[in-house]
Image (tube, rainbow, N blue to C red):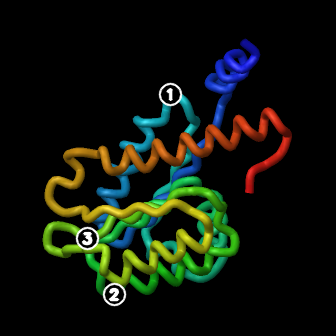
Amino acid sequence: MRLNTVLDSEATAVRTLNLFSLYVDFPAGLRAKWAAGQITRRVAKRWEITAQTWKLDSVITSGSIRNLIGEEAAQADILVVAFSSLDKPEQAVIDWLESLAPALATGGLLLGLLGDDTNWVTSRDAMVKKLATVALRRGMDFGWHWMGKDAMEDPEWLTHRVDQLLDRKQSERFFETQTGLALL
């Protein structure tokens, strides 16, 4: 009975999910906004959401704005990276993510919304591998999806990844409240 009571109170506790989206071009920005909306609708009843969306141009500038944006991104539970073309912006995204790597929260989810109708992406593309490497270094889950035709028609690929993350976070939180110990 005590376990049920703890689970019931745990289910009503306010939890915060930090979502940070980075996009390279306008169409990718629309896809990042779509993903943020899907995530918010999926978790809003159980989690408080904080969400930020920034264009890559904003985060590669020098100065205090870059540092501020970097600090916010480093705290993200879900980090979404979206771009249409895999050409030029590829290295700028990786460089920026690598600059965050030491500060990134571990145990989150890195999501790549990659390509569009005219820019095909496969698991063999260098960008997919680079994003997977960043996620692996930080102990983050990694998921990506080619954002071509019909990608936004069925968000199951996205909600499945988010549900996995939330289940893990809820289990970790339950463990911490019961033992007073944090999972690494």
Dot 1: element: loop
Separation of marks 2 and 3 at Cα, in angstroms: 13 Å
Kindly report which numbered mark, 1 or 2, lies closer to the viewer in this rendering. Answer: 1
As drawn, 14 above or below 159: above
Q: Residue 45 got which mark?
A: 1
Image quadrant holding the C terminus, namely bottom right
Disc number for residue 88 = 2
Where does residue 164 sit, x and y in percent of width and height? 49, 46
Q: Residue at x 41, y 78 (%)?
A: 129
Question: What is the three-letter code of the residue carrying label 3?
Answer: Gly
**Against 113, is 24 above or below?**
below
Q: Earlier in the sequence, mark 1 or mark 2?
A: 1
- The relative height of residue 22 versus residue 108 in the rendered view (above or below) is below
Instruction: Estimate the x, y position of residue 150 in percent, counting from the top left.
Output: 16, 53
CA gap between label 1 and label 3 equals: 31 Å
Tell me the number on the disc at residue 115. Answer: 3
* Relative image position of residue 174 (x, y in whole percent): 71, 35
Please tell me which of labels 1 and 3 falls first in the chain. Answer: 1
Quadrant containing the N terminus in the rendered view = top right
Q: Is residue 45 left or right of residue 104?
A: left
Residue 126 x %, y %? 36, 84
SS at badge 3: loop
Left or right position of 42 against 76: left
Label whose residue precedes the other's in the sequence (2 or 3): 2
